[in-house]
Amino acid sequence: MIESTMWVEKYRPTKLSSIINQKEIIGSLRSLLKNTAEIPHLLFSGSAGVGKTTAALCIAREILGDSWHEYTLELNASDERGINMVRERVKKFARFSGLDTSIPFKLVILDEADEMTPDAQTALRRIIEDTARHCRFIIIANNISKIIEPLQSRCAVFKFTRIPEEDIISHLEEICKKEKIKYNHDGLKAIHEYSEGDMRHSINMLQAAASLGIVNEDNVKASAGLTRTNDVGEILKMALAGKITDARNKTVELIKVYGMSESDFLKYLNEECYKIKTSHLSQILETIAKYDYRLVIGANPEIQLSALLAELGNIGK
């Protein structure tokens, strides 16, 4: 029977030694933990789902013990990007006195810090300096280039790498055995290919596919909304032919009825561009990249995809 518990949390490592791959980083962190009083601020960078947040939480547990919840502030900076978050929440927590004598310092974990505004990062730099005696920061970013240099220079930087296919498949097999679910290798391989080295996404997909009975390639595609990927090619052809309304209707159907995400739609649209014969390939790819960026920075997905199809129609003329 499939449990309702989220497997991504159920199987999240609680010790550094249990983190998949990242052996060099884990070795370095374990060396730092031998003398907790001298641990510097840390900056973890790397793509999504490779263990950055998990490593930060493991450090909190190992340093602060049973009191880690009380003395750790975990924030997702993509939700609160501005300077007010830094001034109100981080500053208040970092400067609050009254540490237990057994606790070396408080810990602030800032996830997705690359989404913070430059002003907020500048304010954070000052707080890090002012509270260094009784507070440590772990800054987590997918894109380290968006972290201002003064912040980077105040941290020990660790760059996490993508998890290899064999490690992801091996870990998924372990979960399948513990949950007593049926699976085959093709199904697990399909999960890896779709998740692109993101362990968190892989485990979520595994649980979704398992709810359909067996983890095989067909159920992985169905659970991820990939069974209609061929329709993306039809949408591209319709848009280039100027049939914008038809293309839009089919796009809305893919996303709202079959559950394909907007980012996946653009991903498959990009792949379909190489399958058609056109003299406007570079122009089409530049257009897709432009709208991909707009979605990343938070523009309305339905409006942007409609505009994308309209622009493809103009290119087709």
Image (cartoon, rainbow, N blue to C red):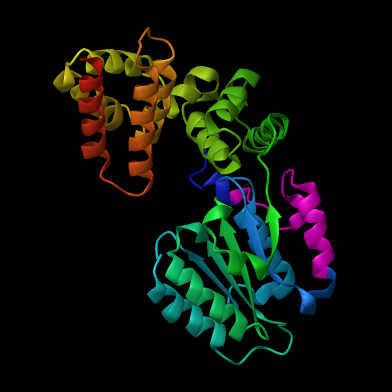
Which residue is depicted at the point 56% across and 23% down?
190
Q: What is the tally of numbered marks visible in this picture?
A: 0
Which residue is depicted at the point 29% across and 25% down?
254
Residue 43 locus on image (x, y percent): 64, 62
Q: Quadrant of residue 241?
A: top left
Q: Please determine whether, in this image, residue 91 is positioned above or below residue 34.
A: below
Q: Is residue 238 left or right of residue 80?
A: left
Q: Please determine whether, in this image, residue 240 is positioned above or below residue 89.
A: above
Q: Nearer the viewer, residue 121 or 246?
A: 121
Q: Is residue 289 magenta?
A: no
Q: Quadrant of residue 224?
A: top left
Which residue is depicted at the point 60% across and 41% down?
199
Residue 112 in view in this figure: no
Q: Is residue 24 magenta?
A: yes
Q: Nearer the viewer, residue 184 or 16?
A: 16
Residue 290 locus on image (x, y percent): 35, 36
Residue 274 locus on image (x, y percent): 44, 14
Q: Is residue 66 left or right of residue 124?
A: right
Residue 187 locus on image (x, y percent): 58, 22
Q: Is residue 107 left or right of residue 239?
A: right
Residue 111 in view in this figure: yes
Q: Nearer the viewer, residue 27 or 178?
A: 27
Q: Is residue 28 left or right of residue 66?
A: right
Q: Please determine whether, in this image, residue 174 is positioned above or below residue 24.
A: above
Residue farthest along the top direction in this orientation: 277
Q: Quadrant of residue 233?
A: top left
In magenta, the rendered stretch is: 10-33
The C terminus appears in which quarter of the rendering? top left
Which residue is depicted at the point 20% across and 26% down?
310
Which SS does the magenta portion mostly show? helix
